[in-house]
Amino acid sequence: MTPRSRRRPPGWNGPPGRRSFRQAALDESAHHRLVRMRGTIFVVCLTLGTLGLAARLVSLHIVQAGTLERIAERQQLGTLTLAPARGRILDRSGRPLAVNVEAPSVFAVPSRIENPKAFARTVAPILGLAPDDLLAKLDPERHFVWLARKASPQAVAGLRAKGLGEQIGFVDEARRTYPNGTLASHVLGFAGIDNQGLGGAELAFDGSLRGQTGVARIERDAMGRPRFETRNVVRAPIDGSDVVLTIDQVLQHIAERELDRAVLETRAKWGAILMMDPPSGEILAMAAAPRYDSNAYARAKPGEWNNRAISTVLEPGSTFKIVLAAAALEAGAVDERDVFTSNGVLKVAGHTIREAHGRVFPTQTLADIIRNSSNVGAAMVATRLGKARFYEVIQRFGFGTPTGVDLPGEAAGLVPPPSQWLGPGLQTIGFGQGISGTPLQILAAAAALANEGTLVRPRVLRAVRDREGRSVAVPGPEPVRQVVSPAVARKVMALMEGAVANGTGTGARIDGYRVAGKTGTAQKPSPRGGYMPDAYVASFLGIVPVEHPRLAILVLLDEPQGIYYGGAVAAPVFRTVAAQALWYLRIPPAVMQVLSTR
């Protein structure tokens, strides 16, 4: 047995399978190194993480702060466009023609609608919609959708009675309203659902009427829905200006009432009555029938929006003889004492020109030609005048170019160049066939004669006023050019006065007033060439009073049935309209004017 002093510690070089103390020490040392290494790695990772977090915080709070703030604002705050109040449209005396009223618009919150199909079945009939169409709008991911803009009071009351809670909401908006219904609808036009001008004066002066939009900040809830009670105005809207028209509401009513009566009695397709102040070019009334209601413009029939007074082109017929007379006198081609002889027939380039109704005027002066509305006489005057000089005066009167009236949709008319006046073209243009113009062009030409030969641009704008009533724009008369001399203009006015006193225009006489006028009966061109045998445009062009012209009036009826002569169907309408207008404007008869100067 080995001595005790030489005995080795247990496990020292012991038998296999037992750990030695040396190996245990080595293992323990390795463990400590592993722990220290893991600690170091942890500290390094922690340090790197802290540095990364610090860098990220620096990036978020310093480098990207502005961008992130804007993103956050977009998520929490929204911008809301504040619509301005659209300016009113007033007549020349300040009476309202177009105003704004509050009307509730209806919206739905699809994200809060539990049963979209039931909701659609309940709401659609009240709003006059198809359930399927309404259902298609109800996207459950959306928080807002319009159901009806500017709904009727009946529809709103019906929806409120259903007790739909947060599924539906109401917002007051301004709705354009025309308190006089169809009155002056072609002049006023209409405004769309967002109060933008879409026709007539609403479109022509939209820049002044619509004002400037404002901006407000508005908070959103966690679902992204706007909270209207949190609205903060950043830029206040600027309301639109009021537009004052030259139209007189009373005169417009007179013109429309008498026009409706004439169209009904004559069974005409359509008609127009225009009334203008010759010195200023201000249009006092512009009536066309049939009309439409600007409050319900979407229900108008095709073509009813069209303002025929400025957009329809037609042959003027015998009313154009006053332009011929002015051109002939201005050029010196005809003298008032010249006599024209005829047997009622004139042959030109193989064509025959005859008097209407087979009449014969053996001898005529220029005054007789205008008084009798002689076609053969007018053709003879045109022949003496010649193409070049006639064409020049026609252009100076404004035919072939728009008058420049401040309303949209004006046509230019058609004046072919003299090179196209083939055959008897010169002669037929002399009595208003083979040339075309708008009703307003015809009236403007007559007003130039009443205005000492000066053509003035027609207009419907009298003034623009801000919301405090201060005038910011007041356009005055705009003379275009001197078309004929004052002396010639006065001579033609005298010829027209003779036509009313004892010619074709006797139906336009007004007791106590001197009236100058000219009748027109124009055969309508056929789309296939030539003229339609039983289709005429009857018209009368009148100025009153002659000594101090205050009213230039055109009455026009398209295809009147039965009697169709301008002197028989249009002249009496002029007399009725003019007599009422003179009384309304307090223009005294000539005898009263003479007595007042004594």
Image: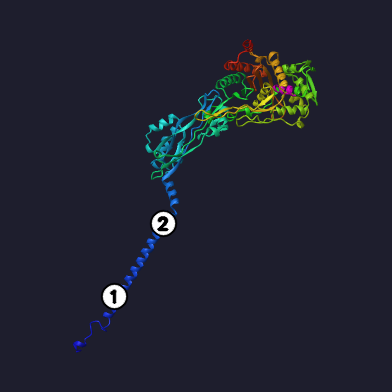
Q: Looking at the picture, which amino acid does disc 2 mark?
A: Val
Sequence-earlier tag: 2 or 1: 1
Residue topped by disc 1: 28
* Residue 252 lies within the magenta run: no
Quadrant assignment for the N terminus: bottom left
Q: Which mark is nearer the camera, 2 or 1?
A: 2
Where's residue 33, x and y in %?
Answer: 32, 73
Magenta stretch secondary structure, dominant: helix
Q: Nearer the viewer, residue 409 or 83?
A: 83
Labels 2 & 1 near each other (Cβ < 8 A): no
Can the viewer see residue 17 in this picture? no
Label 2 crowding class (10 Å Cα cut-off): few <14, some 14-19, many 20+?
A: few
What is the quadrant of residue 286 in the picture?
A: top right
Residue topped by disc 2: 58
Where's residue 388, x and y in %?
Answer: 77, 29
Quadrant assignment for the C terminus: top right
SS class, disc 1:
helix
Q: How many marks?
A: 2
What is the quadrant of residue 434 in the picture?
A: top right
Span shown in magenta: 318-327
